Image (cartoon, rainbow, N blue to C red):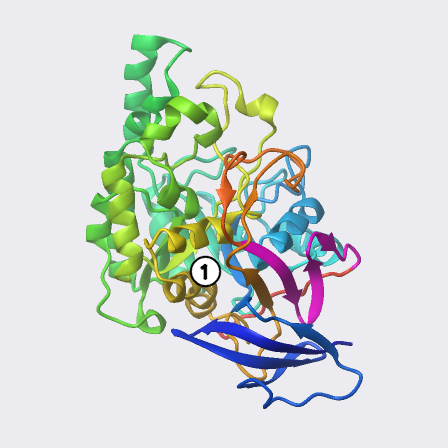
Amino acid sequence: MSNILIRNATIVNEGRIYRGDLLIKDEIISAIGFPEQVKASSDAKIIDASGLLLIPGVIDDQVHFREPGLTHKGDIFTDTKAAAAGGVTSFMDMPNTIPQTVTIEALDDKYRFGSENSLINYSFYIGATNDNINEIMKADPARVCGIKVFMGSSTGNMLVDNENSLRAIFRQATMPVVTHCEHEPTIRRNTETFWKKYGEDVPVKMHPLIRSREACFRSSSHAIALAREYNTRLHVLHLSTADEMKLFNNELPLNEKRITGEVCVHHLWFDDSFYDELGTRIKWNPAIKTKYDRESLRNGVRNDLIDVIATDHAPHTLKEKTNSYFKAPSGGPLVQHSLVVMLELWHNKIFSIEKIIEKMCHGPAVLFNIKGRGFIRENYKADLCLVDPDNPWTVSGDNILYKCDWSPFEGTTFRSKVMMTIVNGTVVYNKGMIDEDYRGQRLVFDR
């Protein structure tokens, strides 16, 4: 069991930055204090964190770790190694695997995979279809993160496009409903138009015109209208447009909001000028859009219209990604680099570091009512990350840990570097070394 004293760290937590010490006993943060005030037993491991930032571990509320059924792209073991190297200590995984996680049996299988293979803490969504409301209602709100509803861009039978089914889900849900919002009929019309003009050779930079601003707004506004009608706890994933910012408000603290929103790091970093350079490597659904949209999303983070920053980590092989527009799948690997991307935006004075920690660590914990995580507080689980804010390094094939073995940030130099990730009081990542024998814990929720 752990007995660790972290000395002289620069602690970033709950809107404050201060120097201090932190004591971990077993899995728990036992004490926090100013330098030299926290005492430890003689057998405690001492970590000198002088010059380092100590933050809560990142909680990523949207990943696709591809297990089961798509493990040639990624799997829970390999990609939680990458997540740990990126300062991520907990994740919530999506249901569009093979088989799809739309039954309790399939959900239980996913939790078994997590317990056997995940180096960090885990939860899994149950997926909605047009006809599985009875199965959804069997899920335990205290042990399942939420219900995933694809209102656009799904595989198999997971597109929920029946209005009666949508209403039943929103009316009966006993846990957060999280939505992928793109209006499928609009996308189909746009697809037909561009196919007629270009055939298979549609330029990738047309992606945000096919999966358009209109498609996003129509679907998001419909989800929010339903949530207001039924008082549903709704969380809209990967917002990508300026228009959608009109749908959210910052009048209430997060713990009182019934409707919340998420933005992903790629929508905060890239804009449509990057398509010429990176092509299908930055093909995501929803699409990366204009600089104006990106700036509006950044403003949404700063002024609390947006509540969470996540990744939508969705790896594909490079062979799959380097196909022509219609054949190349959407999505890319992100969990290893999400924190350093955001810290680079801090260096660039786009966000305060306090705001980044609020949206990546505190926000997911509050929004999903995660028990005992997401903050540096006494008696909370010791999920922590130490970051060197001034240790430049360049993303390259030598340091990418994703199973798919590539990153859209390859060649990018970041000024901050994750030095150590602690999960439940255990050092899982330490300066490039990974404890592959450690296994994380299932998240539980105060609901």
Measuring from the top left, give residue 416's x and y in whole percent: 51, 54
Instruction: Answer above or below: position of 127 versus 49.
Output: above
Is residue 123 visible to the viewer in this orientation of the structure?
A: no
Instruction: Answer above or below: position of 116 versus 31.
Output: above
Q: Secondary structure at mark 1?
A: helix
Nearer to the camera, 210 or 6: 6
Q: Amino acid at mark 1?
A: Met
Horizontal placement of 404 versus 116: left or right? left
The image quadrant of residue 287 is top left
Nearer to the camera, 8 or 259: 8
Q: Count the marks: how many? A: 1
Horizontal placement of 128 versus 221: left or right? right
Q: Per the image, is 418 magenta?
A: yes
* Callout 1 crowding tier (Cα within 10 Å): few <14, some 14–19, many ≥20: many
Q: Per the image, is 77 magenta?
A: no
The image quadrant of residue 351 is bottom left
Task: Give the residue pinned by disc 1.
Answer: 360
Region in magenta: 417-437
Q: Main secondary structure of the magenta part?
A: strand
Measuring from the top left, give residue 431's x and y in whole percent: 68, 56
Instruction: Answer above or below: position of 160 versus 205.
Output: below
Is residue 349 visible to the viewer in this orientation of the structure?
A: yes
Q: Quadrant of the N terminus?
A: bottom right
Nearer to the camera, 126 or 422: 422
Measuring from the top left, give residue 412's x and y in whole percent: 50, 38
Horizontal placement of 61 versus 289: left or right? right
Q: Residue at x 58, y 70 (%)?
A: 444
Instruction: Answer above or below: position of 425 versus 95.
Output: below
Measuring from the top left, give residue 203's x and y in whole percent: 37, 16
Q: Residue at x 41, y 35 (%)?
A: 285
Nearer to the camera, 240 or 142: 240
Horizontal placement of 30 versus 166: left or right? right
